[in-house]
Image: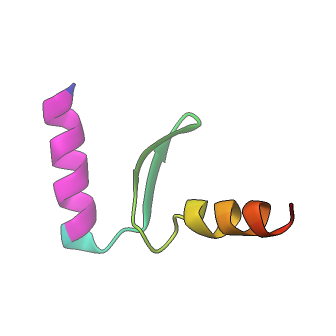
Amino acid sequence: QKQVLDVINNLAREEGFDLVINDGATLYASSQVDVTDKVLKRLTSSR
């Protein structure tokens, strides 16, 4: 399974994909679409 994920990650980088998903599971997401830090900052500042 690691080999499959390595191939997906390499292909995604080479092709410039921002997101690769299957049946509801995210397999690859570029840091440009990861909003985790922004959400956490907003949650922290709203307290």
Residue 31 x %, y %: 41, 68
Q: Any magenta on residue 35?
A: no
**Residue 5 located left or right of residue 46:** left
Whether residue 18 is situated above or below residue 3 in the rendered picture: below
Residue 18 x %, y %: 42, 68
Point 63% across, 70% down: residue: 38
Q: Which part of the image, by quadrant, shows the N terminus?
A: top left
**Residue 43 located left or right of residue 33:** right
Q: How many marks?
A: 0
- Furthest residue in direction top, as rendered: 1
Point 57% across, 65% down: residue: 37
**Residue 37 located left or right of residue 18:** right
**Magenta span covers which residues?**
2-13
- Furthest residue in direction right, as rendered: 47
Residue 6 x %, y %: 16, 44
Q: Any magenta on residue 8?
A: yes
Residue 15 x %, y %: 25, 71
Pick the residue in front: 47 or 2. Answer: 47
Pick the residue in front: 5 or 38. Answer: 38
